[in-house]
Amino acid sequence: MRRSKFSESEKEKIIELKGKKIDWETLKTMFGASKDTLKSMIRREKIARSLPPKLKTSKSSIKGRLGLLTKQIVDINPKLSYRAIPGAVKDAVGSHVAVPSYKAFENFLEANGYIHKKLGKKPMISGINKLKRIEFSKNFIEKDIRFWGKVLWSDETMVRSIPTKMEMFHKVHKSVKKHDLPVNPQIQNGGFGVMFWGCFSRAGVGPLVVIDGIMNKESYLNLLKNIILPKIRLANNIDFFMQDNAPCHTARLVKDFLAQENVPVLPWPAQSPDLNPIENLWALIKRKLASEFSTPKTRSELISNVETICNGISPELCQNLSDSMTNRLKEVLQNKGNSTSY
């Protein structure tokens, strides 16, 4: 008689019969177990029944070693989707082990402080350009806000009537259904677009220029002669002109003209849009265009909307952007030439 396991109904019956003074020999015969086995089972049941009832937990709960393994897998491969985690866990523990659903893993990770974050887009910077960014930062890190306040920041940008790949967020109650939410309209190629050239200094926003066609060295030279240079001379408080390394900016024709007119140009490092505060200004304009204006139906309407936004840019914003240069340079040095948070 080697039996040692009993069903719940058998346990109840054995305890009931023993309570009625049924002898051990009869119980041995009825249930096919030794006297010691029966005694041990009755003793364990009495102890168990004297304890508080067990808390009911989900069979798919993740804890202990399984929880630790799940965290390790996510730490090693943070790009794993929730649906892929059960498969990765099964690969680690073996196919013979049952693992919970992806929802259980999602709940477990959220309860343990793991969140799903959208990564910011940053350009890949080459090794040589990292060195150039470091050199530029070292050369100008000691400059104060008075120096940066006399820099005219400039750049071109394309503004589209319906931006592609732009994320839109609405704060709504959790009870609102998905089909009741407004949509983020998308059109192939973002509808139509207009190219703008703009500039600003610590004193405020400069002229906004609509660019017809492609900006090449000839059209840029014309812009320099008719708008940028008169702006610099009229302001009488601009010591440096900033332009990036676009081909039309670095053409020999343009360089010769700037040198001839004695326009000091900031020696700008390549692959450094994060160092140019006007990029933040363009981003703000595009966000306002998407959130505060209806979708423009014509080119002239788009231009008018952008001009309205530019006219409303405060001097304080321009001051803050200009004054941020020291922190931008510090980040470049801290990040060893890599992209900054700007």
Image (cartoon, rainbow, N blue to C red):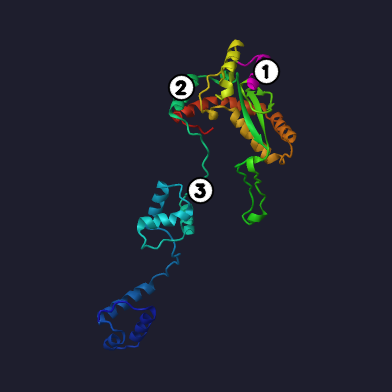
> Considering only vertical position in the picture, is 197 above or below 172?
above
Circle 2 residue: 135
Q: Is residue 251 left or right of residue 107?
A: right
Q: Amino acid at mark 3?
A: His
The picture places residue 55, in percent across and down from the top left corner, at: 44, 66
Circle 2 sits in a helix, a strand or a loop, which is it? Answer: helix
Image quarter for residue 202? top right
Residue 237 is one of the magenta-drawn residues: yes
**Residue drawn at the location 58% of the way across and 18% of the way down:** 146
Nearer-N-terminus badge (2/3) = 3
The picture places residue 105, in percent across and down from the top left corner, at: 46, 56
Nearer-N-terminus badge (3/1) = 3
Pick whichever, 48 or 152, lies toward us.
152
Q: Identify the disc placed on residue 116.
A: 3
Q: Choose mark 3 or mark 1, whichever is in front.
A: 1
Circle 3 sits in a helix, a strand or a loop, which is it? Answer: loop
Q: Is residue 309 left or right of residue 58?
A: right
Residue 66 seen: no
Residues rendered magenta in the picture: 218-238
Q: Choose mark 2 or mark 3, whichever is in front.
A: 2
